[in-house]
Every structure is written in structure tokens, then in C-alpha cells.
Amino acid sequence: MNNINTNKSSNNLKPESLDWSLIQTEMKNKLGLDIYESWLKKINFVEEFNNYLLLSVPTRFIRDWITSRYLDQILQTIKNYKKEIIRIEFKIIEKNEEEIQKENNFKSIENNKNVSFIKDSYLQYNRIDPNKRFENFIIGSSNKLAYEASIKVSENISHYNPLYIYGGVGLGKTHLLNSIGLEFKKNCQIMFISAERFMYQFVKSIKANDMVKFKEHFRNTDILLIDDIQFMNGKEAMQEEFFHTFNALLDKGAQIIVTADRSPNKLSRIQERIKSRFLGGLVIDIQKPDYELRKKIVKKKIEELNNLYPDQIKISQDIQEFISSEITVSIRELVGAINRIVSFSRIYKKMPNLTETKIVLKDLLNIAENKVTIDMIQTLVCKFFKISKNEMLSSRRSRYLVRPRQTAIYLTKILTSKSLPEIGREFSNRDHTTIIHSVKTIEKLKQNDPELVDNINNLKNQILYNNKENEI
Ligand code: ADP
Ligand code: MG
């Protein structure tokens, strides 16, 4: 734990809950994308107390780095939102930040209070990143087909309609979607939106009695790009609207491109008729990058970074090969690893050697082995409270089952990278609102119940320790 006191005064204003994503955005603006992507993005919000925040980072190295370099600025940013906060504490939790990001996005849909910063303009969705173009999409055998189909679609609308691209996290789906958007931007009305935003906008339009505008807006587009459709899990009315929008667009010859983390058949919360629409177009997957592609990406990205800065950085062949062979999970991790190495070299004015590289990349290197599973959490919590797994997963609401169930849900939320709907599914298809409720209940109880805190810490250790044992 790392405590930093900046001032002693604190008032008794009841704190409003802090929106971490807002603070992250501001840190990104303040400290620059480079530093943000390499370090600050790794910080997750854990808990808020009266006058301090508990944050988490994935490794000790990252914590030390952040506290020695950026702590003052982080605290200052937080204080701009909430001046009562006078201290930050870090703890180390190994997590996959990508999933958490998604979860936070999801939370903001749930909680209107938190999304008030999203301006009303529909155009806010069309945030196409000019840096994600076809020209800097590097091709290998795992993504060639998806790339070619995307190019085809950009040249010839309605050739494949819809085009459905799926694959794991960080493999380049959003990059391709962006590239298509950039190609069309010049002469078409395009709409680039994540499924989560679509849901958010839908709910908001209903509340504001503004469905006409919503419909018009979507149906006027020539190109509809929808990212991460797996997060679409809304109520019937929303799926209905989505289906009709979809059909209306196809009828008028608009092009639709959809991405997802899984094939259409495996989308669990989406109506059959929508899935069959997806299957009616071209469905293409992106696989994990092989060694060849990883090496190509490492080389190209280093070149790109070198072009940005006058002081050329030579990253040795050894290190390049090490990164290419060790970071296999996704291209995002790979790019993150390269950014870190380059940050390191710029700050220390030297190249890291292999040992330093391993330290700098520790959390990325371990990602695959450090998975805490929901099953493991459920098993250990059941054992601890002496109930059976069937009881935990049942719908019974007896007191002796409710608390353990909520505890397991809470622990899943803080120890895994699962999104709220995913957690709900693993707990006998409970609704994500139940999941939020459970988490909040435990958080609240923890404030006045030292025994509960003890139990949770105990369980946390068991889960993390159990995980380490499995690794050996
Ligand atoms: P996904 O949407 O599949 O989760 P992204 O498209 O966001 O993944 O890609 C993650 C990161 O990796 C982005 O920075 C992206 O630019 C980069 N990236 C992914 N695939 C490639 C590729 N083939 N060539 C270059 N960069 C890539
Ligand atoms: Mg994406």
C-alpha cells in the first residue's frame, strides 16, 4: 500500500460517487496518449472512501512507476472532480483492463447519472480514429480474409451485406471497422456506433419521447458500422427497433458492417431473426496472430514510433524476438508491450535489457496464467459457507444462501474481468441489475461489518492463492 497525504483538511460533504472513466479521460488529455496507454490505463477504480480512493494496478512495477512519476497529477485530476479526496492508495490486482473498460461502459448505460457527460449530439458516436486505417493494418494469415472483405466492402457497397467480422479481444476488429469508416467518410453518411451506445441512445430516446428522431437518424445512414454487437442484450422493444432499422437499411441498399467477439450462432441474448440476418451476409473471423504476423507488427510499430520522434530508438533484435514470441494473446497486448518498451527507453535514455523488459512487461507476460475463474470462486465460496453449488445457483432466497451468493458475485466482480451480463449468466442467468445490486449490497455491508470484511479477505486470498498453486 502506498499512502500519500497531501493535506489534512476534509469536509463532511456527502460524497457523490466518482466517475472513474471521466477521470481517465482527463488524465489521457493531460498526460498524453503515450503515457496513458502505457501506464495510466492500467489503473482501475476499486473503492471510494470518505476522503481517499482505493485504486488497483496489475503489478508492483506499474504501481511504483506510477506513484513515482504521475501520482501528483492523478490526485490533482481527481480533486478537480471531488475535492474531498486527499489521498490515493494502490493495491495490486492482476486484471485484464480491456474487459473492465467494457464493464465501465456498461455501467454507464445502467446509470444515467454517470453518462450525463455524453453530449446529446448523435455525432458523438461517429468518433472515427484517423490513425486506424487500412494502410497501417498489418496483414497475416490470421486476418487476411477479414481485411480483404473489408476492402471489398469499401470499394463496392452491398457486395457482402451485412459483413460480420468476429474474433477475440484486441485482434483488430475495431481497427478494420474504423478503416472502412474512413474510406466512406468522404462521400457517404456514416454511423459508427458500439452496440452499447446504441442501447444507451435507444433508452434515452424513449425516455425523452424522441423515438422519431432516433429512427430517422439511424435510417438515414448509408453505412452503419456497429462494434461489439455481443453487448446488445436489450429488451424486446430494443431488439425490435434494431431489427427494423437493420431491415430498412438493407432494403435501401445501405451497407452494414458488424463486429463481435463470437460467431452469430453464439450470440446469447440476440433474437434468432437478427442472427439469421447476420448469417445471411458474409461472416468472417479473425484468428489470433501467428508468430510471423506478431514479428511483422513489432517491427512496423517500432518503425512507426521512430518516425514520430527525432531521437531514434534501436530496439534490439533480441527484445523484438522476445516480445514477438511471448506476447501471444492479442495484437493489442503486443502494441501495448512495444509502447512500454519505447516509453522506458525514452525515460531512461537507454534500451531495456532482457531482464528489464521482463519486469516492464510482467503483467502482460502472465496474462494467460493468471486467470481466476468464476467456477473457482463459486466453489471456494460454497466451501467456505458450507453450502452446495446447486444451492448457490438456485433461485431460493433463504438468508443463508443470499449472502454467500452475493459474496461470490462481489468477488467475481472484483477479481475477474467479466462484464456484468457475463457474471449474470454464470449465476443461473440472473439479470445484470441483480449483479449490480449484489455488489452494492456487499460494498455497503463491508463498511460496518468487520467480520464480513475478514471473510471476504480470507476468501480473496484463497482464490488468489489457489490460482497461484494451479500455475505451478
Ligand atoms: P478489437 O476491436 O478486435 O478488440 P482493435 O481493433 O481495437 O481490436 O485492435 C487493438 C489494437 O491493436 C489497436 O491499437 C489496433 O490498431 C492494433 N491492431 C490490431 N490489429 C492490427 C493489425 N493487423 N495491424 C496493426 N495494428 C493492429
Ligand atoms: Mg474493438
Image (tube, grey):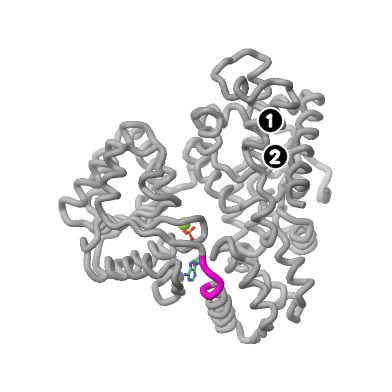
Over which residues does the magenta segment extend? Answer: 289-293
Determine whether the residue tagged by mark 1 lies in a helix, strand or loop: helix
Residue at 64% in and 64% down: 38
Quadrant of the rendered structure where residue 349 is? Answer: bottom right
Q: Is residue 204 visible?
A: no
Residue 352 horizontal side relative to residue 436, left or right: right
State which quadrant residue 384 falls in. Answer: top right
Q: Which mark is residue 443?
A: 1
From the top left corner, tell me how far across and down residue 225 is, in percent: 33, 56
Q: Are marks 2 and 1 in contact (CB under 8 Å)?
A: yes
Whether residue 348 is in magenta: the answer is: no
**Nearer to the camera, 2 or 357:** 357
- Label 2 within 8 A of ligand 1 by Cβ: no
Label 2 crowd bin: few (<14), some (14–19), many (20+), radius 10 Å: some
Secondary structure under tag 2 reads strand
Q: Going from the N terminus, do you reach mark 2 or mark 1 first?
A: 2
Give the residue at x 51% y 36%.
111
Q: Residue furthest top?
A: 398
Write the residue at 67% across / 35% down. Answer: 377
* C-alpha span from label 2 to label 1: 9 Å
User: In the rendered image, which residue does mark 2 sit on?
Assistant: 47
